[in-house]
Image (spheres, grey):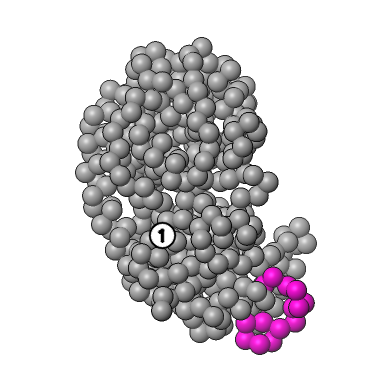
């Protein structure tokens, strides 16, 4: 009989909107552990949709309403964990009971890769702390895979993250900065492993340069002047298109699955396209595997989103990441750095006009970048497989 575990990821397509990166990390875990004899029961915001998408059993999120304040969230966290030991004061229809039953019938829990263990998103900290706490209360093991920790982690969130990591048998950190923070939170060296992003090899087929410039943007501009950003980026893309002859393609990672519905990142994409002189096209948003193949096939990638870079750099695609704050700096620097690239451009520098020179430099170095990335991917692929072996072995 296969081993079965309960896994939480920030997944679930709601109102036809998909977040490619979050789905990709969860899909990678389901696929990798499944190939090692471990079946996953997924915790999802849209359980029915996730069940169909991945062909797995699902349960709803435990549910924390931070609008009620931290004391209420702390009180619910305690009640949920106590309920796992049989001291339940939860209502009969509380979704936490469904999650507890699923964990009780499993061999343990895993936290899928992500970048939400930060004070920016406290609800995700509580969800993950609760799930690991349930497993601990039931005497079952936990594993945490492929995380960015922080960099903003303040107040009681520090204790919550430290507790859930302290109760986990293995912890994967996808950047040096995250590994260092996990160590400061008390994770022993023998349980902490520096990894690449969980979805780095979601698609791993050979990818030749297909002659297009891929652009994926995030609407999160950290309060910067949006028209100034649009104008600056449009200017850079126009020059790159002229100098390289690459076709410009836009692909949204937070978007509606209906290509006629312009929402999420697609709104900003349209603004940049309208400001450009060069022609461009939109590639509809489909799913994680499609997005990964698209990124791996690019001749050049310009991205404000993280997972286009995660997909592209193992195939040696020259990549420029646009960062907006310390969080995106950590993520993009980590994604590029592991595969020998370093072209992360701050949004202020882009607006100031620095994008033209960087794009020209990256394009000149494209052959070396591609060769180096492909070489590095060999060792990272082996290390990633070993990581999944280690996670599976905990159950």
Q: Is residue 124 above or below residue 133?
A: above
**Mark 1 neighbour density, 10 Å: few (under 14) some (14–19) many (20 or more):** some
Residue drawn at (49%, 20%), measured in percent from left and top? 280
Q: Quadrant of the C terminus?
A: bottom left
Label 1: which secondary element: helix
Residue 315 on the magenta segment: no
Residue drawn at (35%, 34%), measured in percent from left and top? 297
Residue drawn at (64%, 65%), measured in percent from left and top? 60
Camera-nearest residue between 290 and 349? 290
Q: Is residue 72 above or below residue 237?
A: below
Choose top left, top right, bottom left or bottom right for residue 69.
bottom right
Direction from residue 15 to residue 37 in the image, left or right: left
Direction from residue 128 to residue 278 in the image, left or right: left
Camera-nearest residue between 354 and 91? 91
Choose top left, top right, bottom left or bottom right for residue 179.
bottom left
- Residue 36 at x, y = what percent? 35, 68
- Residue 175 at x, y = what percent? 39, 52
Residue located farthest toward the bottom when viewing the structure as drawn: 86
- Residue 254 at x, y = what percent? 57, 41
Direction from residue 253 to residue 376 in the image, left or right: left
Q: Quadrant of the N terminus?
A: bottom left
User: Can see residue 333?
Assistant: no
Q: Is residue 258 above or below residue 59?
A: above
State whether the magenta stretch is mostly helix, strand or loop: loop
Span shown in magenta: 83-96
- Residue 164 at x, y = what percent? 52, 70
Camera-nearest residue between 65 and 151? 65
Which residue is labeled 1 in the image?
31
């Amino acid at each position: 009989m296969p081993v079965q575990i309960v896994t939480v990821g920030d997944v679930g397509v709601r109102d036809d909107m998909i977040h490619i990166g979050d789905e990709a990390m969860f899909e990678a875990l389901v696929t990798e552990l499944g190939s090692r004899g471990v079946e996953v029961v997924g915790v999802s915001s849209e359980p029915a949709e996730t069940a169909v998408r991945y062909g797995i059993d699902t349960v709803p999120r435990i549910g924390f309403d931070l609008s009620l304040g931290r004391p209420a969230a702390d009180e619910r966290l305690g009640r949920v964990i106590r309920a796992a030991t049989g001291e339940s004061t939860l209502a009969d229809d509380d979704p936490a009971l469904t999650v507890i039953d699923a964990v009780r019938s499993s061999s343990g829990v895993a936290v899928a890769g992500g970048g939400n263990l930060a004070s920016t998103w406290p609800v995700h900290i509580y969800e993950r702390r609760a799930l690991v706490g349930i497993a601990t209360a039931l005497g079952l093991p936990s594993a945490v895979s492929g995380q960015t920790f922080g960099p903003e982690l303040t107040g009681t969130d520090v204790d919550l993250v430290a507790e859930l990591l302290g109760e986990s048998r293995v912890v994967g950190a996808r950047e040096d900065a995250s590994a260092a923070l996990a160590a400061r939170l008390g994770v022993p060296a023998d349980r902490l492993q520096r990894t690449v992003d969980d979805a780095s090899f979601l698609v791993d087929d050979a990818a030749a340069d297909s002659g297009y410039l891929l652009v994926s943007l995030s609407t999160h501009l950290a309060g910067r002047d949006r028209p100034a950003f649009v104008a600056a980026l449009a200017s850079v893309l126009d020059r790159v298109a002229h100098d390289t002859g690459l076709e410009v393609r836009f692909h949204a990672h937070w978007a509606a699955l209906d290509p006629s519905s312009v929402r999420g990142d697609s709104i900003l994409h349209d603004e940049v396209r309208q400001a450009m002189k060069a022609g461009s096209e939109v590639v509809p948003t489909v799913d994680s595997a499609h997005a990964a193949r698209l990124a791996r096939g690019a001749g050049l990638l310009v991205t404000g989103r993280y997972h286009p870079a995660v997909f592209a750099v193992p195939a040696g695609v020259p990549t420029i990441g646009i960062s907006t704050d310390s969080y995106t700096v950590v993520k993009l620097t980590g994604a590029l750095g592991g595969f020998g690239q370093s072209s992360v451009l701050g949004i202020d520098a882009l607006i100031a006009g620095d994008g033209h020179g960087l794009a020209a430099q990256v394009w000149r170095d494209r052959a070396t970048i591609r060769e180096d990335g492909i070489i590095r991917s060999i060792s990272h692929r082996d290390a990633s497989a070993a990581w999944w072996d280690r996670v599976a072995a905990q159950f």
